Amino acid sequence: DGGITQSPKYLFRKEGQNVTLSCEQNLNHDAMYWYRQDPGQGLRLIYYSQIVNDFQKGDIAEGYSVSREKKESFPLTVTSAQKNPTAFYLCASSKRGQGAYEQYFGPGTRLTVT
Amino acid sequence: KNEVEQSPQNLTAQEGEFITINCSYSVGISALHWLQQHPGGGIVSLFMLSSGKKKHGRLIATINIQEKHSSLHITASHPRDSAVYICASATGNQFYFGTGTSLTVIP
């Protein structure tokens, strides 16, 4: 079955540590996205990538980094510079990097930093 | 930046009721998306539309481009429809999301 996988589902880290969230898709989609969801707020875009080896900052990129070395994979690193990293992180993909294409979402990773 | 507003924020309905969720956005868009988020956090896409109306089962989505407004209707609501419904506007390469409408359908 085609889809998007994110791992792990729950992640706990100590403050000051970097952590990498995994996102893999087998839909052959060009575009991939990382969103952050906080209670009472809409999803906010962290980074997006329209093609391999290219990515763009979203509205809240500070304290995060990404790579897109393979079409299937778009890992997100939450660095120690991110002031409030505890949140629910969602990865998504679409056939092309334009809004006229449906987005497919992974199950999410809930990150807790103490 | 496209501001997206949804109403109501919370909605409780009796099973069988007709439900309407509204979404308004501030600037022109290439498409409007309706998403459903289940209690566990997973999100599925329900509709993508740029004009007119779409129907899938008991769900209907409409959009009025001139008024920058979209509605999601659920006919004959059922407890399994309980979820958060999210509206998202697509402008260029980016999506802007509403804060969601939390729907609870009581048997």
Image (spheres, helix red, strand yellow):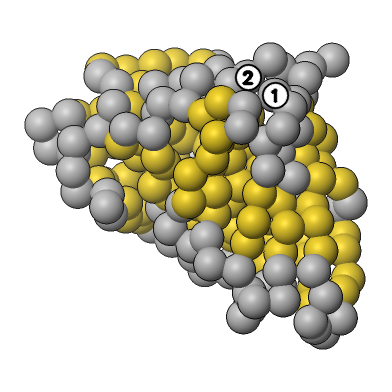
Instruction: Please name which of the two marks, 1 or 2, marks the residue nearer to the observer.
Output: 1
Q: Position of residue B100 (x, y in %)?
A: 48, 54
Instruction: Check disc 1 and report the residue beneath it.
Output: A71
Please tell me whether residue B69 is drawn above or below residue B99 in the rendered image: above
Q: Nearer the viewer, residue B72 or A64?
A: A64
- Residue B98 screen position, x and y as percent: 41, 52
**Which residue sits at x=79%, y=52%?**
A21
Q: In the image shown, does B102 or B93 lie closer to the viewer? A: B93
Q: Is residue A5 left or right of residue A34?
A: right
Where in the figure is residue B73, as x and y percent of width and height? 41, 33
Residue wearing tag 2: A29
Q: Residues within 10 Å of mark 1 (few under 14, many from 20)?
A: many
Q: Amino acid at mark 2?
A: His
Separation of marks 1 and 2 at Cα, in angstroms: 8 Å
Residue B32: horizontal and vertical position, in percent?
Answer: 35, 32
Res. B45 visible in picture: no
Label 1 marks which chain's residue? Answer: A
Q: Amino acid at mark 1?
A: Lys
**Crowd around label 2: few <14 · some 14–19 · many ≥20 (10 Å):** some
Contact (Cβ within 8 Å) of mark 1 with mark 2: yes
Q: Report the residue at 60% width, 69% height from top.
A: A63
Residue drawn at x 50%, y 56% as measured from the top left: A44
Disc 2: which chain? A
